[in-house]
Image: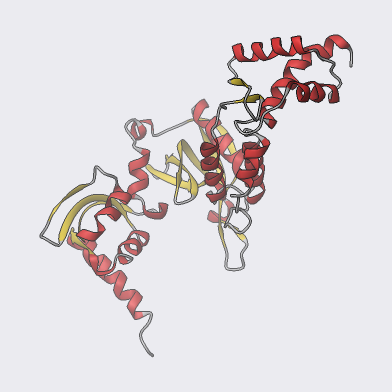
């Protein structure tokens, strides 16, 4: 390597050494720095290394020179602290919409943001292998195309599939393409969803991104802007149980007091609740009425019931009756 080039690279190799091999518990001595540079084809004197360290400090790197043991140079702080990286690793491995392969790749990249010693601590908490993960590797390109469509203010077309009992992908609408105006993305119930406007049906709809195929941007301008001017994505997710479609209703529900935490977790701290009696409270909530919502309510047993409107309460009774009839002895 020509000397002029090697000297330009010297400070970069020094930065790499500090990033990868040092932290508060692990330092590098001047002798180790010189040896590391020599192994990379760079000859350096102590004086020039002192100057490089000072330049990196002025650049913003929190490099400390410690005299007590373990003596030497180390990087005292980083862009991401270890607890933050652990949190990100947990999020990646818990995400169903990120494939096993991509999870491993992302976690490797997160490890590169820590020293090699802290990277080992991150690796010990990784349990991706047996997680349920999507099998659609194209989800990352889908997300990118959706964001591009939103920024360019155009509609998209795509095909959408569901699983058959033979565990095969089956295209919905006989393979015909959907045409939707995308307005946002949300991560709900461990899946990624696109929220958009269906111009033909004149309504807001959502689609699982990992089940969207062959997304194409059109030249048509997006529609439904007036519906999304004051659209609250979090509120939409709260009222749509399991992201199953249905009709929107304002319900009054009665719960035993022990379920107040469950209600707040589901509908948020701003949920409208009031005391019914010493053992119960009432909650007024807007939900998308669906079998998924009824299933959530059933999971709370006798501690929850629909008070009004009466037609929805009757629909719930019929839902429960239908389940019971499926277990009647012949």
Q: Nearer the viewer, residue 176 or 114?
A: 114
Relative image position of residue 21 (x, y in whole percent): 69, 31
Q: Residue at x 62, y 39 (%)?
A: 118
Dividing the image into 4 quarters, which one contains the C terminus?
bottom left
Please, is residue 44 above or below residue 198 in the view?
A: above
Q: Is residue 150 left or right of residue 119?
A: left
Relative image position of residue 124 (x, y in whole percent): 62, 49
Q: Residue at x 49, y 27 (%)?
A: 153
The outermost residue toward the front is: 68
Q: Nearer the viewer, residue 73 or 250?
A: 73
Relative image position of residue 71 (x, y in whole percent): 66, 26
Relative image position of residue 26 (x, y in whole percent): 65, 32
Q: Nearer the viewer, residue 4 or 322?
A: 4
Please, is residue 45 above or below residue 113 in the view?
A: above
Q: Do we see residue 215 in this rendering?
A: no
- Total numbered labels placed on residues in the image: 0
Please, is residue 25 above or below residue 327 in the view?
A: above
Q: Is residue 72 left or right of residue 279?
A: right
Q: Residue at x 30, y 55 (%)?
A: 262
Which colour scheme appears in the figure? secondary structure
Q: Is residue 44 left or right of residue 51?
A: right
Dividing the image into 4 quarters, which one contains the N terminus?
top right
The outermost residue toward the right is: 1
- Quarter occupied by residue 92: top right
Q: Do we see residue 190 in this rendering?
A: yes
The outermost residue toward the bottom is: 330
């Amino acid at each position: 390597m020509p000397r002029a080039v090697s000297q330009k690279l010297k400070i970069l190799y020094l930065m790499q050494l500090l990033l990868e091999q040092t932290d508060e518990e692990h330092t590098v001595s001047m002798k180790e720095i010189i040896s590391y540079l020599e192994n990379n084809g760079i000859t350096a004197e102590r004086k020039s290394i002192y100057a490089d360290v000072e330049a990196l400090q002025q650049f913003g790197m929190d490099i400390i020179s410690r005299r007590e043991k373990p003596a030497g140079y180390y990087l005292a702080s980083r862009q991401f602290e270890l607890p933050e990286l652990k949190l990100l690793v947990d999020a990646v491995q818990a995400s169903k919409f990120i494939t096993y392969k991509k999870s491993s790749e992302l976690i490797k990249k997160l490890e590169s943001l820590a020293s090699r010693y802290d990277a080992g601590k991150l690796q010990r908490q990784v349990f991706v292998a047996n997680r349920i993960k999507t099998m659609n590797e194209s989800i990352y390109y889908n997300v990118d195309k959706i964001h591009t469509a939103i920024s360019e203010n155009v509609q998209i077309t795509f095909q959408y599939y569901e699983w058959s009992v033979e565990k095969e992908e089956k295209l919905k609408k006989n393979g015909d393409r959907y045409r939707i105006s995308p307005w946002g993305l949300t991560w709900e119930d461990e899946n990624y969803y696109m929220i958009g406007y269906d111009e033909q049906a004149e309504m807001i709809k959502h689609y699982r991104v990992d089940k969207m195929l062959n997304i194409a941007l059109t030249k048509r301008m997006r529609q439904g802007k007036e519906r999304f001017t004051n659209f609250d994505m979090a509120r939409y997710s709260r009222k749509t149980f399991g992201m199953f479609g249905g009709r929107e209703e304002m319900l009054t529900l009665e719960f035993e007091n022990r379920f107040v935490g469950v209600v707040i977790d589901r509908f948020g701290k701003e949920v409208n609740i009031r005391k019914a009696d010493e053992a119960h409270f009432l909650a007024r909530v807007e939900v998308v009425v669906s079998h998924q919502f009824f299933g959530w309510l059933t999971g709370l047993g006798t501690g929850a019931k629909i008070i009004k409107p009466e037609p929805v309460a009757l629909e719930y009774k019929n839902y429960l009756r239908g389940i019971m009839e499926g277990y009647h002895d012949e």
